[in-house]
Structure formats: structure tokens, C-alpha cells
Amino acid sequence: MDSLPPQVLIPVGVILAALIGGFFSLISLIISKEQKTSEFRQQWIDSLRQEISDHIAASITLSAMRQFQSVTDEEFLKVASEEQQRVASTFTSIKLRVNPEESDEKIKKLNDAFLEKLEECRRLYNNSQWEDARKCCNALTDSAIPMLKAEWERVKRGERVYV
């Protein structure tokens, strides 16, 4: 069998080097994308945590104000109106952030439990059940903790495609 002339080995070497370089570039691109996705997911978790905190704080404040203050006081009505707007705004923001159609069954159950508790607190507040609404905020906090923890575990583990 005849050996290949040396002139043929040079283009083969160049092609192999290009393929190896392309492979490592692709791997680098995938790693970079996954890191960015994890960063965005972490920002989402932090923002959701802040929204939940703001919502609970505003709900507790407004419930206490409604329960213990005179409704005719003009200053009270102004402050209550601002808190009421904050409750509505954070409620909507939280609802838009939490995915009720999550594909991961474990996280879906946690999301559903959290959203049910969020709706229950809203219902109690809308029915002027101030004391129960404040108590519900504690249960809302308790249901947010495992949901946020599961999302944090997802960030630590990485995206399914990457793993």
C-alpha cells in the first residue's frame, strides 16, 4: 500500500485543527449560555423574593391599618390607598412571575400551593377579614420558602440540557 504524500497531510491537519477548535468553541458557547441562564434565574428568584416580601409587608400593614384605624380619617385614607396600591401591584407581579404550568412536577406542586395561599390571602383581605388576612401572610411566607428553595436547587444543579 502506498503511503500518502506529505502534501496531503497538511490540509488534513488543518481540517482536524479547525474541527477541534470548533468543538471547543461550541462547548464554550454552551457553558456561557448556561451560566447566563443561571444568572437570569438567580435574578428572577431574588426579584420574586423581594416582591413576596413587599406584598406580605404591605398586606400586614394594610390589614392592621384597616382593623385598628378610623376609616374617616383623611390622612389614614391617603396612606391606606398607597398601601392598597402596593398590595395590588405586588400581587399582580408575583402572579406573573410564578409559572402555574411548570413542567417539573415537584416544582409545579410547590408553585400551586404558593399560588393557592396567595389567592386565599387576597380573598381574606377582599372580604375584610383583617386578622385572618394577617395570619394568612405567615402561611404565605411558609409556602414561599420551599418554592424558592426548589428554584435555588435548580440554579445550583444547572439547566437540564446542560447537565
Image (cartoon, rainbow, N blue to C red):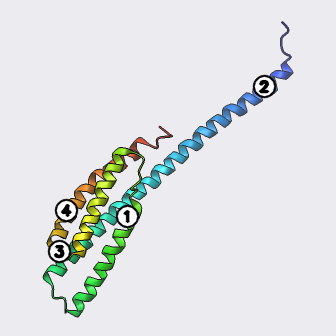
Q: Nearer the viewer, mark 3 or mark 2?
A: 3
Alpha carbons under labels 3 and 1: distance apart: 22 Å
Position of 42 with respect to 32 (left or right) is left
Q: Are marks 3 and 1 in contact (CB under 8 Å)?
A: no
Which-is-in-front pick, marks 4 and 3? 3
Mark 3, secondary structure of its residue: helix
Query: Label 3 belongs to which residue?
Result: 130
Crowding near the residue tagged with mark 4, few <14, some 14–19, many ≥20 C-alpha atoms within 10 Å: some
The amino acid pointed to by label 3 is Trp
Amino acid type at circle 2 is Val
Dot 3 or dot 2, earlier in sequence: 2
Kind of residue at badge 1: Lys
The mark closer to the camera, 2 or 4, is 4
Picture residue at 29% right of the left edge, 65% below the top: 119
Label 1, secondary structure: give it.
Answer: helix
Q: Amino acid at mark 4?
A: Asn
Task: Give the mark nearer the N terminus: 4 vs 3.
Answer: 3
The residue drawn where x is 16% and y is 69% is 132
Closer mark to the observer between disc 1 and disc 4: 1
Q: Which numbered tag is attached to residue 12?
A: 2
Mark number displayed over residue 15: none
Precedes in sequence: disc 2 or disc 4: 2
Residue under label 4, please give it: 138
Mark-to-mark CA distance, 2 and 4: 68 Å
